[in-house]
Amino acid sequence: MPGPGSPSPQRARLDDTALEPAPIPPAQILAGNPVARSARLTGSPDGAFNACLWTCTPGKFRWRYRSDEVIYVVAGRARVEPEQGGEPLELVAGDVAQFRRETSAVWEVLEEVRKVAVLREDPPDPLARVRSGLQREPF
């Protein structure tokens, strides 16, 4: 696979991807013992865009989205209830769902879930370092 920042297309195989532990903070677990694992599949050089593979065993937990996220459920079944109101989602293999940054939801994983998540962050401000240098005190 080409390295990060390469202009060549990049590919990842879900079946060959090694997953690392991605523990859900104990304070967010509401029921059961959900065990999550994840791996970064690919992304943009500036970190504004990333695609990840995530799995989770059955359990119930609260999740706050720190970035915009679109998911594709590869396998499993979960019920997701938005904390800001709205209809709960029953997600199964083949479903696509979107979660906006700064929203929260309660996930109830009913059958082990495997999903591909595409996350979008605000790109870094290229002028931030210049501006911070201009605000420094002189020697």
Image: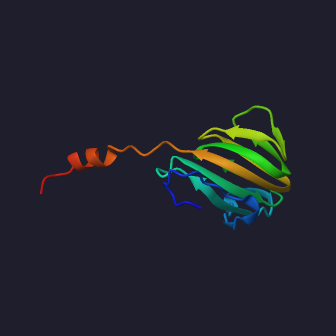
Q: Residue at x 78, y 48 (%)?
A: 73
Q: Residue at x 71, y 45 (%)?
A: 71
Query: In the picture provided, is 119 more to the left or to the right than 28?
Result: left
Residue reaching furthest left?
139
- Residue 2 location, quadrant: bottom right
Report if residue 83 is visible in the image.
no
Residue reaching furthest top?
86
The picture places residue 50, in percent across and down from the top left corner, at 58, 50
102 over 19 or under it: above or below: above
Quadrant of the snapshot with the N terminus: bottom right
The picture places residue 107, in percent across and down from the top left corner, at 77, 49
Quadrant of the snapshot with the C terminus: bottom left
- Residue 80 location, quadrant: top right
Query: In the picture provided, is 70 more to the left or to the right than 66?
Result: right
Q: Nearer the viewer, residue 13 or 47?
A: 13
Q: Residue at x 61, y 46 (%)?
A: 119
Q: Nearer the viewer, residue 109 or 30?
A: 109
Residue reaching furthest front?
8
The color scheme shown is rainbow
Q: Nearer the viewer, residue 111 or 103?
A: 111
